[in-house]
Image (tube, rainbow, N blue to C red):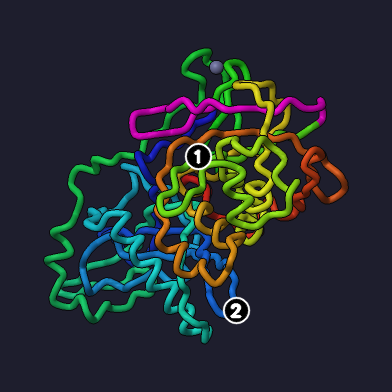
Amino acid sequence: VRLLLNGGDFLRFWIPPPAAAGDEILLAPYWRFRGIDCALRADPYRVDERVIDATFPALAEECLPPSLGLRPQALRLRFASPLTPAFFLLPTRTLAEALAGVEPLARAGDALAGETQAAHREFIAETASLVYAPLVVRGTKVLDALLGRELADCAEHADRILAHVDRRRGWELRFLPALCPECGRDLLGDRRSVVLLCPQCRVGYAGGRAGLRRVPYLVVPAARDAIAVPFWRLRVAIHGRELETAADLVRFGNLPRGVTTPAADAPLAFWAPAFSFHPRLFLRLSRQLTILQPQVAAEEGGLIRRFLPVGFADRGALGVVKSVLAEIGVPRGEMPQLIPRLEVEPRESALVFLPFEERGGDLVQPQMGFAVPKSALQPAGHRSGAPPAG
Ligand SMILES: [Zn+2]
């Protein structure tokens, strides 16, 4: 029986300190986001994508370092559990408060690169987690336990920091067996999966605060050797512009006739990859599929023989809506004013598996005629999912 990690809303990791740091380790929480910053720039008109992998203090104590720098990428992270031999400090800052820090960070990145300010930004979140960094208190001093160096700004605040120690560990990381609650069979997926599949009941399951949550999926029937590749099909209400049907999208982007094949009055859907994927290709693939508006003849719970795991949650993908609109909208001169004003209200998301065929180094979708390089599926250094537990 494999185990499915269920850390409540977020996975929690910690960075173990060197042995010289001693036994009395405090763990300071940081929010970590990994995803894509999409910036709409007016002159010349373009949508820039940049990978963001950033940390922000989850504890509102001004004296803590404002970020963990490259440590989450460079050091080995371990899953935090009630048995972790250290004292956890309780987060006081919500994810949303910390997410507000992404925008200034992205703007600072622009300034460093000598870029003009963006007219609009969207953040496509691949993962959000909590990473705990070790501190040591010596008298009135607070030390960074990794470097063995004093945090000078915290000199008089050791008591305040100690007051945040979590005595209950109420979040308690739980492990659910990765078994189908209906039929008891092993669920299929890998360690990075956000949705695991039951091959018997033909339904998906995602971990959640209250245990496993059912996630139905749609499958486009395919030849025996096809690989089922997961996508999110997002239906949203857009306020500020009439964008309800496929025909509305053709007008919005002045797309060539025939690009969108379906009935003109079919409801508009936005598509995004649901598999772990090289971020720089994420938006390109989303745009291609959204322009195509595939009207898939999909069966709920159809047969899947081989599949790519679902590594990307629908709530993180919503940023594709405005990013894709910014990329295709015309006249371009109006977009820097229009795109920020649009409001996107999520209505429905569906997990849809489309069949791809292996051809050399590519996976090819034969009906729609587009390809994904296999090398983009397992990006090097991708650590957002699950480092080894320990
Ligand atoms: Zn089952």
Point out residue 109 in the picture as x, y percentages from the top left corner. 47, 78
Query: Measuring 64% from the left and 50% from the top, which residue is drawn there?
Result: 250
Query: Measuring 61% from the left and 43% from the top, which residue is drawn there?
Result: 246
Say whether residue 60 is magenta: no
- Residue 345: mark: none
* Span shown in magenta: 204-225
* Label 2 C-beta lies within 8 Å of the nearest ligand 1 atom: no
Q: Is residue 260 visible?
A: yes
Point out residue 243 in the picture as x, y percentages from the top left corner. 51, 47
- In this view, the residue in front, 105 or 160, is 105
Q: Quadrant of ligand 1?
A: top right
Separation (CA) of disc 1 from disc 2: 31 Å
Q: Is residue 384 above or below residue 185?
A: below
Point out residue 197 in the picture as x, y percentages from the top left corner. 58, 27
Point out residue 166 in the picture as x, y percentages from the top left corner. 20, 50
State left or right for residue 228 relative to residue 243: right
Q: Mark 2: which secondary structure?
A: loop
Judging by the rendered image, the residue that carries numbered circle 2 is: 44
State left or right for residue 111 relative to residue 261: left
Amino acid, disc 1: Arg
Query: Measuring 37% from the left and 70% from the top, which residue is drawn there?
Result: 67
**Of the image marks 1 and 2, the number of the one nearer the N terminus:** 2
Amino acid, disc 2: Pro
Q: Is residue 161 above or below residue 240?
A: below
Query: Measuring 80% from the left and 45% from the top, which residue is drawn there?
Result: 369
Judging by the rendered image, the residue that carries numbered circle 1 is: 235
Say whether residue 222 is magenta: yes
**Label 1 Cα neighbours within 10 Å, binned few <14 / some 14-19 / many ≥20:** many
